[in-house]
Amino acid sequence: MAGEILAFTLLGDGNWVAYVGDPYPTGPGRRVIWNDMLTFPSRQTPAPVKCIFPYLTPHDGSSFLLVDTRMGNQPNASLMNILGQVLLTFAAGDGIEQALCSQDAFVCTYFDEGVYGGLDPSQAGVAVFSKGGNFLTGWHSRFGWQDVSISDCYCACFDPSGRLLFSPYTEFPLVRWDLKANTRQIWQLPESLQCCHALSATDTHTYFWGPHGYDVENTMFGFELRTGEVSVVGELAPLAHRQPLSDGRFLTWDQEQYLVVDPTRP
């Protein structure tokens, strides 16, 4: 395929989608986007929505969310199907670190330029949107800054019950937010689990892949939520990118290949 893969995700049943374009900047926050393409296993089509900094996340087996992570307060999130048709567009905020989809909501987390950029909903640190793209609530707007303050949310995921888990900078607790009940649980993590590259979860365990700043960036840890027990799952050098999948799994990918990693299986 012409260009480079700028974003990639799995949709299930062997389906995947890649956002392909020219990666080279033409200036601060600018890139040639007119030839950007969406690539699927058997075909390629011009991207109907052009993104300077694209991010892809699965919605279900036949649709996905495409987000431009730096767009101010402009509409920058598009729900699309595997035909490349746009089903919904909404404004998801600026400085997006990660986008996630559950059965009931869209969620975006934000890095520091979003949180402190003066624009809603990014100032919430973590923002929740309805399936119609309407802003519902955010962490800081709902719970304030005292229990958990979010300056940068590196990693987040949904568990199989639809609860959101995340571990934000600067204190790196583990937070589980039940969006339906609007309740939260907070665990203080040992230093060995803090500031990881990617997070994934089952209903009983959370998996941390590659904490920053240690000699364990390729190590995957398990954290048992009931007891707080930490275990080493194994060592695996990731490809260029890491992101969560459902049921405790991870996706890692680069320009040549992708790999699904399941820490729940020996």
Image (tube, rainbow, N blue to C red):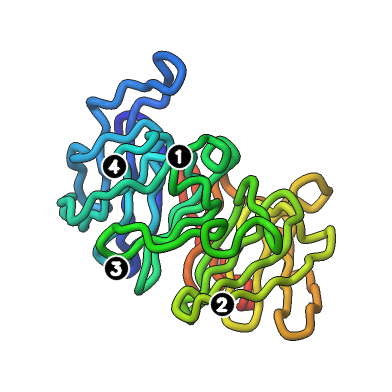
Q: Is residue 38 left or right of residue 216?
A: left
- Nearer to us in this view, 145 or 247: 145
Residue farthest top in this picture: 27
Q: Amino acid at mark 4?
A: Pro
Tell me the amino acid under the disc marked 1: Leu
What amino acid is found at the position of numbered circle 3 in the picture?
Answer: Gly
Q: Quadrant of the N terminus?
A: top left
SS class, disc 4: loop
**Disc 3 vs disc 4: which is toward the camera?**
4
Looking at the image, is mark 1 or mark 4 earlier in the sequence? 4
The span from disc 3 to disc 4 (Cα, nearest Å) is: 24 Å
From the top left corner, tell me how far across and down residue 9 is, in percent.
40, 54
Which structural element holds mark 1? loop
Residue depicted at 74% across the width and 71% down the height: 187
Label located before the other in sequence (1 or 2)? 1
- Is 258 rendered above or below residue 132? above
Q: Is residue 230 left or right of residue 34?
A: right
* Nearest to N terminus: mark 3 or mark 4: 3
Q: Residues within 10 Å of mark 3 (few under 14, many from 20)?
A: some
Q: Nearer the viewer, residue 237 or 147?
A: 147
- Among the two numbered marks 2 and 3 on one chain, the one whose residue lies closer to the N terminus: 3
Left/right placement of residue 155 relative to residue 30 reads right
Tell me if residue 231 comes above or below residue 151 in the rendering: below
Q: Quadrant of residue 104?
A: bottom left
Q: Which residue is mark 4?
A: 75
**What's the distance in space between the residues labelled 2 and 3, CA to CA?**
29 Å
Q: Earlier in the sequence, mark 2 or mark 4?
A: 4
Which residue was labeled with disc 1?
119
* Circle 1 or circle 3, nearest the eye: 1
Q: CA distance from mark 1 to mark 2?
A: 25 Å
Q: Residue 183 — which label?
A: 2
Q: Which residue is mark 3?
A: 61
